[in-house]
Image (cartoon, coloured by chain):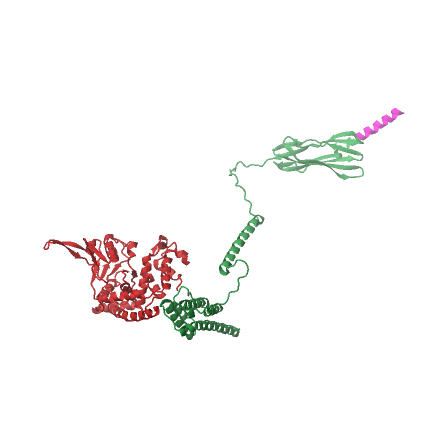
C-alpha cells in the first residue's frame, strides 16, 4: 500500500515540480549567478519558511527577492528598516476619518505575499518584534481587530554583516524564527563580467509572472507530503543533538565552542527544508544528501558561539562541517 | 782486705761514671726538623739516646702543652731504632705546633739510666729553640676583602648517578605507559599479542554470507537487508580504500571512489546497488525479487574484484621491483 503511495507521490512531484525549472529560468534572466541564493529562496518559498539574507551591499539580495516576487503574481512590499521606523509603519494603524467620523484601519506594508525587510537590523527591537510576531503568528492585530496575513506569506529580511554601528542585532530568539539564513557571497569572475555587460547595454531583462500564489500553496502541500523515512528523521535529530552535546558524537573539542545548541525548531526547519530540497530535485522522498544540502542554512544562525570560539576564529559553519562529518549517515 | 775490695769497687764505679759523663755529647742529641715555622705549621721534635749495653733508659713522656704556646700533637713516641754490639740507639719523636708567634725553647727531656733495675744516672737532653712566625702583612698596600663566599664543590659523576637512574626509571615508566595505552587503543589489549585481524575482504565476505543466510528479504525485512549490505560495503570500502564512508552519503562515497582505480563495471554495479538500497531505505521502495537476489552477489563480486585488483597491483609492483633489481 505504502509502496503505491510513494510511486504515486513520485509521479505527482514530477508533475508538480515542473514549475521549479520555469521559475528558476525566469529568475536567472534577471539575476546573474547566485544560484545558491535562488535555490534557497525557492526552498524557503516551498517550505513556508522565512529567510534571512546576509551579505555585503551590492550582491543582488534585494533584486533577487524582488525578482522572485515578480515571478509570482503576488503582492510584494518592501520596507526599508530605519532607526525611526515604528511598528505602526509596518503593521498599520487606525486613522480617524472626519468624513465618516470613525476610526478606519489602514493596513501596513506587512499585508503582502512577499515582504522584503531591508536591513532589518537598522530598526529598534520593537519594530523587529512586530515583524517577527507577524511572521510567527501569520496574523496582525490592529486596534481590536485581528487580520490574517495573506497566503503565501514570506518574509525575506536582509542584513549587512559590516557597518555594525547604530544597528540593533536580532536577538537569538528572533533569529530562530527565520527558517534559513543564507549567506550571499560575491559572484564569480565570469558572472561579474556578465553583470557589467548587462548594465552597460542599459537593457535590464524583466522577469515575467509565471506562477500564481495558488500554485505555491499547492506546491507547499505536495512538499509536506514528501516522504521522510524514520532513518532520515533520526539523522536530523542526531545532527541537531550534536550541536547540543557534541561530546556524545566524538566531538569533545566542540563542547567549549558552543554556548547553546539548535532548538527543536531547528529540527522542524531542517526536516521541512530537506523536503523542499528533495522536491526541487524532483524526488518524492528525502535522502541524507538533502539534509546535508540545507544543513548550513538551517543551523548557522541557531548555534551560539562562545567567546573561546570567537577568539579562535571558529565559525558556526566550521562547527556544522565538523558535525556533519562526524554524525553517521544512515 | 774487705776495706780494700770496697775501695776498688767504688773506684771502678766512679771511673765508669766519669767516662759516661765525659761522652754525654755523643750519647744524647735533640733536634727539630725546622727551627722556624709559620703559625699553625707542624714540626717534628726528635731526640736520640745512645744506651750502652746492659743499661736501660726511662724518659718522662709528656702530653698537651710542651711549653706555653707550643702544643704536642699526637703521642710522644719512644722507640729503639738501632742495636749495635756495644750499645743500642733509642729515639723519641713528637709532632709539635704553635698558634702563637714568638720564640720558644722546647724543654730538656730528662733521661734516667738504669742497670739491673738500679738507677745509675740522670741526664738531660739539650733544649731546642723554635721560632714561630706569623704571615707577613704588607700594610702599605693593604686592601680589605669581603668574606669569601661559600665554596661550591663541582658536582661529581658519583653524585649524579642516583639522579640519572631515577630519571631513567621515570622515562621508562612514561614510555611503557604510552606504549601500553597505544597498544590498548589499537588492539584493546594491554598484555599479550592481539588476535590477528582478518583482512577487510574476508570480514566483508563473511558478513555478506551471514546476510544471505539470514534470508532477510524473504522474510519481508527488505530495509534491514539493504541496510546491512550497504553497511558491510561501507566498512569494506573504508578499510580497503581508506575513504571515510560511515559519515558520508552514497553519492559522496561514489564520488570519492570515482578517482580510485576501479573497474568501470564494478563502479556501475556498486552505484546501482547503492541507488536501489537508498530507494529501499529512504523511499519505501519495494525492490523486485531479481534486485533482491542480485544484491548480495553484486556486493560479493565487488569485494572479490577489488581484492583481486589489489593483488594484481601488488604482484605487478613486486615484479617491477625484481626487474629493477
Q: Viewed as shown, does residue B165 lie left or right of A301?
A: right
Q: Residue at x 56, y 51 (%)?
A: B165
Q: As drawn, which residue projects farthest toward the top? A: B3
The span shown in magenta is B1-17
Chain letter tied to red: A
| Percent coordinates x, y for residue A280 in the rendering | 30, 68
Relative depth, front residue between B263 and B323: B263
Instruction: Please tell me in which quadrant of the rendered image residue A6 appears.
Output: bottom left
Q: Viewed as shown, does residue B213 lie left or right of B103?
A: left
Instruction: Please tell me in which quadrant of the rendered image residue A188 appears.
Output: bottom left
The number of numbered discs placed on residues in the rendered structure image is: 0
Q: As drawn, which residue projects farthest toward the left? A: A99
| Percent coordinates x, y for residue B85 in the rendering | 80, 39
Relative depth, front residue between A2 and B22: A2
- Does the magenta run of residues contain B13? yes
Q: Main secondary structure of the magenta part?
A: helix
Relative depth, front residue between B309 and A82: B309
**The N terminus of chain B: image quadrant:** top right
> Where B38 falls versus A224 (above or below)?
above
| Percent coordinates x, y for residue B225 in the rendering | 42, 68
Q: Viewed as shown, does residue A193 lie left or right of A143?
A: right
Tell me, yes or no, if residue A11 can be seen here. Answer: yes
Q: Colour of chain B?
A: green
Tell me, yes or no, if residue A85 can be seen here. Answer: no
Amino acid at each position: 500500500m505504502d509502496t503505491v503511495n510513494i510511486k504515486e507521490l513520485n509521479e505527482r512531484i514530477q508533475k508538480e515540480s515542473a514549475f521549479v525549472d520555469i521559475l528558476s529560468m525566469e529568475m536567472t534572466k534577471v539575476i546573474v549567478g547566485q544560484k545558491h541564493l535562488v535555490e534557497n529562496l525557492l526552498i524557503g518559498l516551498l517550505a513556508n519558511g522565512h529567510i534571512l539574507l546576509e551579505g555585503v551591499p551590492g550582491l543582488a539580495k534585494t533584486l533577487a527577492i524582488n525578482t522572485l516576487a515578480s515571478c509570482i503574481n503576488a503582492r510584494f512590499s518592501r520596507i526599508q528598516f530605519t532607526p525611526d521606523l515604528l511598528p505602526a509603519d509596518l503593521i498599520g494603524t487606525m486613522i480617524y476619518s472626519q468624513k465618516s467620523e470613525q476610526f478606519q484601519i489602514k493596513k501596513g506594508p506587512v499585508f503582502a505575499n512577499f515582504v522584503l525587510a531591508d536591513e532589518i537590523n537598522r530598526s529598534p527591537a520593537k519594530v523587529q518584534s512586530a515583524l517577527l510576531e507577524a511572521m510567527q503568528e501569520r496574523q496582525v492585530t490592529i486596534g481590536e481587530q485581528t487580520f490574517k496575513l495573506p497566503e503565501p506569506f514570506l518574509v525575506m529580511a536582509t542584513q549587512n554583516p559590516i557597518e555594525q554601528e547604530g544597528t540593533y542585532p536580532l536577538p537569538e530568539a528572533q533569529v530562530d524564527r527565520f527558517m534559513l539564513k543564507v549567506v550571499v557571497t560575491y559572484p564569480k569572475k565570469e558572472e561579474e563580467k556578465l553583470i557589467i555587460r548587462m548594465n552597460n547595454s542599459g537593457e535590464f531583462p524583466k522577469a515575467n509572472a509565471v506562477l500564481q500564489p495558488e500554485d505555491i500553496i499547492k506546491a507547499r502541500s505536495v512538499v509536506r507530503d514528501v516522504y521522510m523515512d524514520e532513518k532520515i528523521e533520526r539523522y536530523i535529530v542526531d545532527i541537531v543533538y550534536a550541536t547540543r552535546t557534541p561530546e556524545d558524537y566524538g566531538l569533545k573539542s566542540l563542547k567549549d565552542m558552543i554556548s547553546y545548541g539548535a532548538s527543536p525548531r531547528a529540527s522542524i526547519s531542517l526536516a521541512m527544508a530537506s523536503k523542499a530540497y528533495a522536491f526541487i530535485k524532483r524526488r518524492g522522498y528525502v535522502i541524507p544528501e538533502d539534509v546535508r544540502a540545507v544543513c548550513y542554512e538551517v543551523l548557522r544562525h541557531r548555534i551560539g558561539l562562545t567567546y573561546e570560539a570567537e577568539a579562535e576564529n571558529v565559525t558556526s559553519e566550521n562547527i556544522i562541517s565538523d558535525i556533519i562529518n562526524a554524525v553517521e549517515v544512515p | 782486705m774487705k776495706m780494700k775490695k770496697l775501695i776498688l769497687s767504688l773506684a771502678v764505679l766512679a771511673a765508669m761514671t766519669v767516662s759516661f759523663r765525659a761522652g754525654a755529647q755523643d750519647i744524647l742529641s735533640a733536634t727539630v726538623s725546622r727551627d722556624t715555622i709559620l703559625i699553625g705549621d707542624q714540626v717534628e721534635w726528635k731526640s736520640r739516646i745512645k744506651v750502652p749495653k746492659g743499661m736501660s733508659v726511662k724518659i718522662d713522656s709528656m702530653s698537651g702543652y710542651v711549653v706555653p704556646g707550643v702544643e704536642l700533637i699526637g703521642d710522644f713516641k719512644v722507640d729503639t731504632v738501632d742495636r749495635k754490639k756495644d750499645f743500642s740507639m733509642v729515639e723519641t719523636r713528637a709532632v709539635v705546633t704553635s698558634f702563637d708567634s714568638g720564640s720558644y725553647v722546647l724543654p730538656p727531656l730528662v733521661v734516667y739510666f738504669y742497670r739491673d733495675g738500679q738507677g745509675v744516672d740522670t741526664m738531660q737532653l739539650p733544649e731546642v729553640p723554635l721560632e714561630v712566625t706569623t704571615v707577613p702583612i704588607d700594610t702599605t698596600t693593604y686592601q680589605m676583602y669581603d668574606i669569601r663566599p661559600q665554596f661550591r664543590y663541582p658536582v661529581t659523576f658519583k653524585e649524579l648517578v642516583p639522579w640519572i637512574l631515577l630519571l631513567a626509571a621515570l622515562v621508562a615508566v612514561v614510555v611503557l605507559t604510552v606504549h601500553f595505552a597505544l597498544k590498548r587503543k589499537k588492539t584493546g589489549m594491554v598484555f599479550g599479542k592481539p588476535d590477528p585481524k582478518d583482512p577487510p575482504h574476508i570480514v566483508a565476505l563473511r558478513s555478506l554470507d551471514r546476510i544471505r543466510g539470514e534470508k532477510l528479504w524473504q522474510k519481508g525485512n527488505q530495509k534491514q537487508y539493504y541496510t546491512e549490505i550497504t553497511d558491510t560495503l561501507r566498512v569494506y570500502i573504508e578499510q580497503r580504500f581508506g575513504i571515510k564512508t560511515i559519515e558520508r552519503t552514497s553519492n559522496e562515497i561514489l564520488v570519492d571512489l570515482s578517482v580510485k582505480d576501479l573497474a568501470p563495471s564494478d563502479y556501475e554495479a556498486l552505484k546501482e546497488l547503492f541507488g536501489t538500497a537508498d530507494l529501499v531505505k529512504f523511499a519505501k521502495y519495494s525492490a523486485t525479487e531479481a534486485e533482491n537476489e542480485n544484491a548480495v552477489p553484486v556486493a560479493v563480486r565487488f569485494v572479490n574484484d577489488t581484492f583481486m585488483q589489489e593483488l594484481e597491483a601488488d604482484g605487478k609492483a613486486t615484479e617491477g621491483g625484481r626487474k629493477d633489481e
